[in-house]
Image: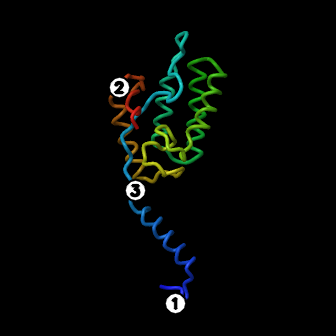
């Protein structure tokens, strides 16, 4: 249609943009296998003493890898803080880590540790559909098969370094 046929150029441009966006909605990209780098840009354990919270970070990474809604992210971040508090017995450390993941873990940042990092960049905050949940459950089970206790191993922690 042209402007002469009753469709103004601005309306045509908007329709083309919406059509282009809709074309990408029909085929979802697959979820990549789970990877972790432990506590990302933060120490995995105390430099002095025996406190080790890396397992907390692996559990948090499983949630971040899968992604989902903004409310699910907030719950995952709060669970990380609770876990770190339990492991390190330090409210200050737990609060610092919570602040760090809230500031740096947004789904909109093009980082290897963003919310939903298992999906291609650009997914944002959206609930997983049943097919995506099943895919995530299968990949999670495959990872947990070789690391059921979420132990931070050098092999696991080096996986995301090159992403």
Mark 1 burial class by Cα count in 10 Å: few <14, some 14-19, many 20+: few
Q: Marks 3/2: CA distance? A: 29 Å
Query: Please, what secondary structure does the residue beneath circle 1 have?
Result: helix
- Tell me what residue is drawn at x 37 percent, y 50 percent: 30
Position of 46 relative to 75 (above/below): above
Identity of the residue drawn at 54% across and 72% down = 14
50 versus 110 height, above or below: above
Tell me the element at label 2: helix
CA–CA distance in space, label 3 to label 1: 36 Å
Give whichever of 149, 106 is nearer the camera: 106
Residue 80 sits in quarter? top right
Mark 3 crowdedness (10 Å alpha carbons): few <14, some 14-19, many ≥20:
few
Label 2 to label 1: alpha-carbon separation: 63 Å
Which residue has dot 3 on it? 28
Q: Is residue 105 above or below residue 128?
A: above
Q: Is residue 79 left or right of residue 30?
A: right
The residue that mark 1 highlights is 5
- Image quadrant holding the C terminus, namely top left
Q: Residues within 10 Å of mark 2 (few under 14, many from 20)?
A: few
**Residue under the image location 46 percent in, 42 percent down:** 117
Residue 51, horizontal then vertical, whole percent:
54, 15
Label 2 belongs to which residue?
A: 155
Q: Secondary structure at mark 3?
A: loop
């Amino acid at each position: 249609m042209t402007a002469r046929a009753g469709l103004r150029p601005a309306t045509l441009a908007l329709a083309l943009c919406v059509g282009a966006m809709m074309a990408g909605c029909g085929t979802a990209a697959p979820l990549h296998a789970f990877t972790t780098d432990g506590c990302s840009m933060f120490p995995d354990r105390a430099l002095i003493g025996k406190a080790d919270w890396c397992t907390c970070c692996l559990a948090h990474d499983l949630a971040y890898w899968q992604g989902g809604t903004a409310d699910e992210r907030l719950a995952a971040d709060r669970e990380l803080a609770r876990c770190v508090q339990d492991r390190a017995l330090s409210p200050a450390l737990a609060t610092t880590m919570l602040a760090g993941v809230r500031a740096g873990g947004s789904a909109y940042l093009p980082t290897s540790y963003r919310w939903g990092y298992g999906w291609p960049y650009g997914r944002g905050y959206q609930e997983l559909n049943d097919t995506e949940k099943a895919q995530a459950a299968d990949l999670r089970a495959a990872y947990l098969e070789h690391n059921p206790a979420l132990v931070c191993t050098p092999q696991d922690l080096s996986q995301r370094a090159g992403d």
